[in-house]
Image (cartoon, rainbow, N blue to C red):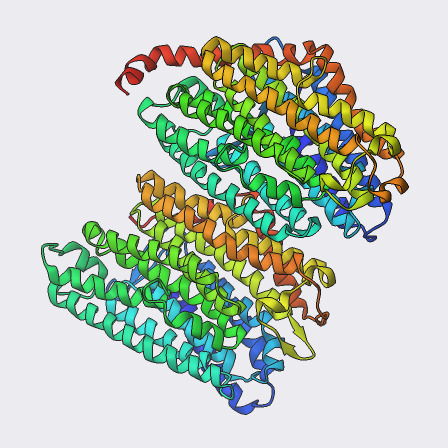
């Protein structure tokens, strides 16, 4: 029974979901109650996670569930991301007429799935978590069901994601077949790397995971789904599932298959380089901001994978630093998107930003900071994210990866600059509404200041993350 | 001295910019006075710094060392004889830029001043940072305000120019970032002082040198990556051109001295022919192109390319005269090119044309302007008695010492320089006054007079009496060369003979 203390966050969030569902049936007409309640419950879950002991590794249920620094940190990131998504999207949901009680509950469900994924130390547990989060995400993508694009994106995501889940499951079965266990530790110990079957298993699982984080060449779904889904769901897609998938990536590569590094390292490097280049090049032609965010997130995933590929603790830490900063930047970017509203209609193409700086100086200044940070220009936070990744990449003398990565930041800088050009150099259009909710303002201010002044205390984040030691 | 004087130099303009950011009125003069005040105080501090500065030693002074990226990079700033002059140049040019916005910047004055002040902070930071990562941070961050200055307040093709400027420079710099991180892993530190002491393994030097070179060559700019400069200069507003020509270009020259020579002596020795040839091409080619320009700003931009060619040539002669000449040439070019761009700005504000053929016969309507313009024209072509002469003379002296042919070809650049500058002057100021619109334009107003005279005074003063400049840099340059030769003799011979 003592063990249950450690998974109290998961238990709490499951109970909350059931409670909210029942409450939702009775209070069908007050979605804001459910919405606010779910934010509160999420935050309580976060506090429960903090309650877990730091710097100790606890394994539960026959070593199939693990709680360590990595899992706690990633869960907190997930929960903060989810809470912010809920906090800042209220108004958007109301205006888009999708302010329903199912929405926060679905988000909670997918967060529960992610928490299971993050802590999983067993292929089966991992798969269950993955499916739980995916099922909720399918529904969320098509949440605005009266809109053709939203339904289309939901369906598209479902079909492709199911395919990748199938591949992943096939990989799991191969690994089970060749190693005799689904537990990461046992696989790692009993591994005989001469088996090609294991390599195939790894490849299949990597393909499935690459699909979930939309790494090239498994990115095809991302632009359409990002564009078609409601903006708040796009924000959720852009940040939260990536945290969970990244954690699984780390655990899967470094716990059972660390000895087979020569088998998977080239794959990760290829995924990384392809994502960085493709994300940068393909984003240039985009005119829709949400689509552009999709390509830019593909590019950023490339950098995160670059950190993963180096097979050192520093590399893993740099990836985690990168994703933390990436979350903040995307929160800020989407806060700006939520502010582009006129007469109860949201705008989402680059041209709609035209001349924004004349009418909305503060909003455009924030966007300027966020975009330059996404482009990785010092002294903004985005630069440090890239800096840490390349620091660990170069430590392993992987110069090719570093140079390709940095050159693709130059290409990527072009499309970020194009947005800045539209905001600052072009002619002004009509003003946007300014009746934003407090939380939206707070999240924008908070993320902008964090990005802008990160360079004053750059070591704080790294210090926390350097407690993650997997290898 | 415990007071962090360098950090306050770096921070003060940014604090001024923050003040402006939170001020309510957007176009009134109050903002201008705030900006002017902060930058002027900064100028005074830097002069005081020069007064405190001890020129008899080459160790870094006013050093501040704070923990920054834990266990990895420290925020370390300090100055020696080489960097202090650039800091003073920066703090001198910035207030003049701020005064000059009177007539040129009609929209969003406050934002413009913020950009200029932030720019000043970053440029001072570049010249005093003693850590490669800190240097890179300042070096790259300068792109953001400059991009906005060109893009928002520039001329017709400002978007194209701003993009070109940004992407060219960024492309050059990312390789430098790779090199900096590599240096960290090779030597275990990015602290310049420690790197000077320990030296870098010879087998890495060539690649690292090339990576740094790619960044500095774009910024200098050297042929063939100079093409962003004419575009950026032509489209930038006057104050932007001034900052660009006077200070931004000097970052690269400073970088060559501080990093290429200081950290990679053996590679520098090896690549000297490359730098010589590129410099000579830049000098001759840019001078010839400048002769054919019909746009005044473009002409001066190409003359900058030629002058910076002299600077790189001088630096890589690795002689006392050559490097000192390069530093003085950079300072002098900073003053003179700033003044020339301001001169073009003066007539542009009145006629809204940069084309040479619009003008002619200005001497009869703007006599005061013509005098000052002449002074700067002569300084640009290196007439004895102006600071331009000292720089070019020392550089050529250094070059003759090392390689007669190189020096002889470079000397042609001086002649071409005289040709294009004098021809420009003749076409704009002398000749018949054909364009009747010119009759109506007024001569210099007080603020313009003030700006141009405050540049003319140092140009003439250092032209006749360069002693203070040479005194300041002499020991640092001497020690740099000694360290260079020491490293070369110690590790160099076998490596160089293998090549």
Between A435 and A287, the one lying in front of the other is: A287
Is residue A94 visible in this depiction of the protein? yes
Q: Would you place residue A236 above or below residue B422 in this image?
A: below
Percent from the top left, x then y, of residue B93?
72, 31
Question: Residue B285: percent from the left, percent from the top?
Answer: 53, 30
Image coordinates of residue B158 in percent, x first then y, are 64, 50
Q: Position of residue B27 (x, y in %)?
A: 83, 51
Q: Residue at x 64, y 35 (%)?
A: B299
- Residue at horizontal 20%, vertical 49%? A262
Q: Choose between B147 and B236: the one closer to the eye.
A: B236
On screen, residue A420 versus residue A237, left or right, reads right
Tell which of B353 and A318 is nearer to you.
B353
Whether residue B58 is visible: no
Figure quadrant of the C terminus of chain B: top left
- The part of the image, by quadrant, that contains residue B492 is top left
Q: Is residue B59 left or right of residue A168?
A: right
B21 vs B409: above or below: below
Q: Is residue A79 left or right of residue A270?
A: right
Quadrant (top left/top right/bottom left/bottom right) for the N terminus of chain B: top right
Where on the picture, by quarter, is residue A276?
A: bottom left
Where A31 sits versus A358, above or below? below
User: For the image shown, how many numbered marks are present on the structure?
Assistant: 0
């Amino acid at each position: 029974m003592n063990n249950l203390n450690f998974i109290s966050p998961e238990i709490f969030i499951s109970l909350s979901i059931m409670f909210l569902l029942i409450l939702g049936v009775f209070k069908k007409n007050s979605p804001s109650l459910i919405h606010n309640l779910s934010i509160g419950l999420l935050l309580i879950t976060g506090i429960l996670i903090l309650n877990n002991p730091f710097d100790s590794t606890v394994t539960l249920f026959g070593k199939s569930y693990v709680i360590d620094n990595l899992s706690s940190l990633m869960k907190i990131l997930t929960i903060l991301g989810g809470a912010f998504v809920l906090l800042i999207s209220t108004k958007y949901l109301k205006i888009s007429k999708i302010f329903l009680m199912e929405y926060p509950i679905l988000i909670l469900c997918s967060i529960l799935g992610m928490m299971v994924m993050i802590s999983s130390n067993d292929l089966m547990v991992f798969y269950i978590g993955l499916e739980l989060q995916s099922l909720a995400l399918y529904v969320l993508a098509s949440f605005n069901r009266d809109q053709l694009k939203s339904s289309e994106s939901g369906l598209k995501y479902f079909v492709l994601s199911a395919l990748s889940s199938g591949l992943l499951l096939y990989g799991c079965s191969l690994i089970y077949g060749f190693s005799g266990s689904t537990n990461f530790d046992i696989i790692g110990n009993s591994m005989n790397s001469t088996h090609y079957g294991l390599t195939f298993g790894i490849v299949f699982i990597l393909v499935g995971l690459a699909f979930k984080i939309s790494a090239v060449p498994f990115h095809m779904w991302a632009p359409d789904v990002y564009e078609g889904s409601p903006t708040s769901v796009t924000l959720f897609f852009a940040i939260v599932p990536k945290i969970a998938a990244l954690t699984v990536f780390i655990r899967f590569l470094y716990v059972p298959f660390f000895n087979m590094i020569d088998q998977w390292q080239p794959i990760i490097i290829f995924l990384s380089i392809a994502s960085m280049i493709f994300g940068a090049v393909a984003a240039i032609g985009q005119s829709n901001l949400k689509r552009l965010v999709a390509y830019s997130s593909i590019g950023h995933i490339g950098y995160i994978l670059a950190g993963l590929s180096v097979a050192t603790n520093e590399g893993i830490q740099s990836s985690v630093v990168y994703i933390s900063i990436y979350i903040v930047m995307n929160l800020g970017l989407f806060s700006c998107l939520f502010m582009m509203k006129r007469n109860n209609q949201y705008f989402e193409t680059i041209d709609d930003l035209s001349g924004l700086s004349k009418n909305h100086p503060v909003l455009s200044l924030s966007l300027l900071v966020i975009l330059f940070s996404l482009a990785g220009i010092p002294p903004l936070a985005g630069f440090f994210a890239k800096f840490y990744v390349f620091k660990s990449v170069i430590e392993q003398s992987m110069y090719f990866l570093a140079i390709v990565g940095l050159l693709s930041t130059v290409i990527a800088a072009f499309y970020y600059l194009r947005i800045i050009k539209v905001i600052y150099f072009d002619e002004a259009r009509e003003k946007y509404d300014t009746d934003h909710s407090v939380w939206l303002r707070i999240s924008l201010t908070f993320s902008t200041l964090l990005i802008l002044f990160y360079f004053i205390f750059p070591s704080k984040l790294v210090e926390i993350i350097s407690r993650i030691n997997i290898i | 001295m415990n007071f962090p004087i360098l950090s306050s130099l770096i921070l003060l303009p940014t604090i001024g910019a923050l003040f402006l950011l939170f001020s309510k009125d957007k176009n009134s003069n109050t903002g201008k006075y705030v900006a002017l005040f902060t930058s002027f105080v900064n100028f005074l501090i830097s002069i005081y710094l020069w007064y405190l500065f001890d020129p008899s030693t080459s160790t870094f002074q006013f050093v501040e060392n704070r923990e920054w990226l834990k266990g990895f990079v420290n925020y370390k700033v300090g100055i020696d004889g080489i960097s202090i002059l650039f800091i003073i140049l920066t703090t001198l040019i910035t207030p003049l830029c701020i005064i000059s916005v009177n007539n040129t910047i009609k929209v969003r004055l406050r934002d413009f001043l913020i950009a200029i002040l932030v720019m000043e902070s970053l440029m001072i930071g570049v010249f005093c940072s003693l850590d490669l990562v800190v240097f890179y941070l300042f070096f790259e961050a300068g792109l953001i305000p400059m991009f906005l200055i060109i893009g928002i307040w520039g001329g017709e093709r400002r978007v194209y120019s701003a993009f070109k400027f940004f992407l060219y420079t960024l492309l050059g710099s990312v390789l430098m970032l790779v090199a900096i991180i590599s240096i960290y892993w090779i030597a275990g530190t990015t602290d310049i002082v420690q790197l000077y002491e320990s030296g870098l393994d010879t087998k890495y030097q060539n690649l690292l040198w090339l990576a740094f070179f790619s960044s500095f060559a774009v910024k200098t700019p050297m042929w063939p990556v100079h093409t962003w400069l004419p575009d950026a200069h032509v489209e930038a507003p006057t104050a932007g051109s001034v900052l660009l020509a006077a200070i931004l270009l000097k970052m690269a020259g400073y970088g060559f001295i501080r990093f290429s020579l200081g950290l990679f002596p053996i590679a520098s020795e090896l690549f000297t022919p490359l730098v010589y040839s590129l410099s000579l091409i830049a000098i001759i080619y840019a001078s010839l192109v400048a002769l054919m320009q019909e746009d005044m700003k473009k002409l001066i931009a190409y003359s900058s390319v030629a002058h910076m060619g002299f600077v790189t040539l001088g630096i890589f002669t690795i002689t006392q005269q050559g490097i000192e000449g390069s530093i003085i040439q950079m300072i002098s070019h900073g003053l003179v090119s700033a003044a020339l761009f301001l001169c073009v700005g003066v007539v542009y504000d009145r006629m809204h044309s940069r084309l040479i053929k619009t003008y002619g016969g200005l001497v009869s309507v703007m006599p005061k302007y013509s005098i000052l313009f002449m002074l700067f024209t002569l300084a640009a072509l290196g007439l004895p008695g102006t600071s331009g002469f000292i720089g070019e003379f020392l550089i050529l002296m250094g070059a003759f010492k090392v390689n007669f042919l190189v020096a002889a070809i470079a000397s042609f650049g001086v002649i071409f320089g005289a040709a294009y500058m004098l021809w420009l002057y003749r076409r704009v100021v002398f000749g018949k006054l054909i364009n009747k619109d010119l009759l109506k334009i007024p001569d210099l107003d007080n603020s313009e007079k003030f700006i141009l005279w405050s540049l003319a005074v140092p140009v003439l003063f250092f032209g006749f009496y360069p002693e203070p400049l040479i005194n300041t840099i002499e020991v640092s340059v001497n020690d740099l060369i000694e360290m260079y030769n020491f490293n070369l003799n110690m590790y160099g011979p076998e490596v160089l003979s293998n090549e």
